[in-house]
Image (cartoon, rainbow, N blue to C red):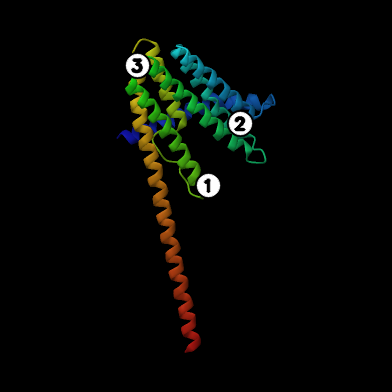
Amino acid sequence: MWVAMAKIFSVSVRSVMAWVFDPVARTLLRLGVSPNAVTVAGTVGVLVGAGLATQGWLLAGLVVATLFALTDAIDGTMARMQPRPGRFGALLDSSMDRVADGAVFGAVAYWMAVTGDLPSVLAALLCLVAGQLVSYVKARAEGLGLTCDVGLVERLERLLIIGVGGLATGLGLDWGLPVVLWVLAVLSGVTAGQRIWHVYRQDRAAVARAAADRAAADHVAAGRASDRTA
């Protein structure tokens, strides 16, 4: 049930994002703005928001960081609308995503440490590590020629969830961000496990197919050899 609900949430969020950001992406392209420029600008904005959060402006910082993190959807849409030769854009986007994620969860961990909430510090660090693992597993799988488009929470959902937690805490619900951190840590860990298991199953299936193909080829070769000797 929870998996189905998470999938519905993910699809709904992405549908809304597409409805909102597709016109923005088209406008930026008409103005001559490149996807790489949007990627870098979004990362700078996230770093500014993370800096605000470490200075005590938690609500403002997380709102700024979350809004700028959404540019990840814009630059990706721009790249699909106007494909360019070369692969540097994909590398830049992935690299900046890791920087932005580290800044957001690092800032949250720092703020929780300042306020003396050590369990939430642990939760924030778990979110950071699990989130990086989720992204790495997908990148590594695709580098090996496998697919890995599975999992409960991807990067967009993680950032939206942490933004909701920051908003709740900033509006006076002190338990909002700590609860969200632990929920997100669990969901991110489950997502990493799902992706590893998905890749494992693909790899085992590929090995089985290769073995079957070799066996079939050997059988054919043996049959031909038998015909020649007969």
Judge whether 138 appears above or below 169 on screen.
below
The quarter of the displayed image where residue 22 is located: top right
Q: Determine whether label 2 and label 1 are within 8 Å by CB.
A: no
On the rendered structure, is 76 left or right of 29?
Answer: left
Q: Distance of mark 2 from mark 1, alpha carbons? A: 23 Å
The quarter of the displayed image where residue 87 is located: top right
Q: What element carries label 3?
A: loop
Instruction: Classify 10 Å Cα crowding around label 2: few (below 14), some (14-19), many (20 and above).
Output: many
Mark sitting on residue 116: 3
In-front residue for pair 132/208: 132
Of the 4 image quadrants, the one containing the N terminus is top left
Mark sitting on residue 78: 2
On the rendered structure, is 134 left or right of 18?
Answer: left
Instruction: Classify 10 Å Cα crowding around label 3: few (below 14), some (14-19), many (20 and above).
Output: few
Instruction: Classify 10 Å Cα crowding around label 1: few (below 14), some (14-19), many (20 and above).
Output: few
In this rendering, the label closer to the viewer, 1 or 3: 3
Q: Distance of mark 1 from mark 3, alpha carbons? A: 41 Å
Q: Name the residue under label 1.
A: 143
| Residue 58 point in image, percent of width and height | 44, 14
| First of labels 2, 3 by sequence position | 2
